[in-house]
Amino acid sequence: QVQLDESGGGLVQAGGSLSLSCVASGRTFSIFNMGWFRQAPGKERELVARITWSSGRADYADDVVGRFAISRGNDKMSVNLQMNSLKPEDTATYYCNAIEYGPQNYWGQGTQVTVFS
């Protein structure tokens, strides 16, 4: 089992910045990919950014390229999402995701990001 502990998020004016952090615990040795998804009211959950652990390769949704940056933690199994130039349409609940070999998906509890204009 893998547990994901999220932090960050909050309320910010358009154009501002927020950061999210997610720390994995438990059977972390089997994780090969971590990232962030988001879900706005009435919409499906969508990928925001993810990073492959072995290569460090990062993938982003088209609408966050150049504004968001995902990175790995240095000393623990964690990912950070730096969100800059935030827009009202970025408002959503953001979920940390980890995938372990199997494959098996794990989700955090979600953290709210609200961007007001």
Image (cartoon, rainbow, N blue to C red):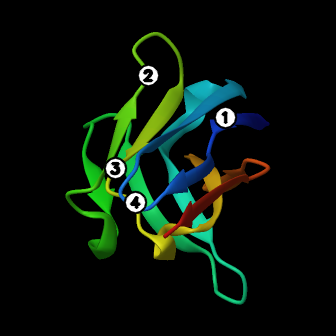
First reached walking from the N terminus: tag 2 or tag 1: 1
Quadrant hosting residue 24: top right
| Residue 70 can be seen in this image | yes
Q: What residue sits right under mark 4 in the picture? A: 86
Q: Which mark is residue 73?
A: 2
- Give percent across and percent down for residue 116: 55, 66
Q: Amino acid at mark 2?
A: Gly
Q: Which residue is mark 1?
A: 7
Query: Which circle, 2 or 4, is nearer the viewer?
Result: 4
Q: Earlier in the sequence, mark 2 or mark 3?
A: 2
Query: How many numbered marks are there?
Result: 4
Q: Residue at x 27, y 56 (%)?
A: 67
Residue at position x 49%, y 57% in the image: 13
Residue 4 location in percent, x, y?
A: 71, 37
Q: Is residue 43 above or below residue 6?
A: below
Q: Is residue 110 left or right of residue 39?
A: right
- Amino acid type of the residue tagged 1 in the rendering: Ser
> Mark 4: which amino acid?
Leu
Which label is found at residue 51?
none
Could you tell me residue 19's position as x and y percent?
Answer: 48, 39
Q: From this viewpoint, is residue 102 visible?
A: no
Q: Is the residue under label 4 in contact with that under label 3 (CB below 8 Å)?
A: yes
Circle 3 residue: 84
Q: Is residue 88 above or below residue 7?
A: below
* Label 4 vs label 1, nearer the camera: 4
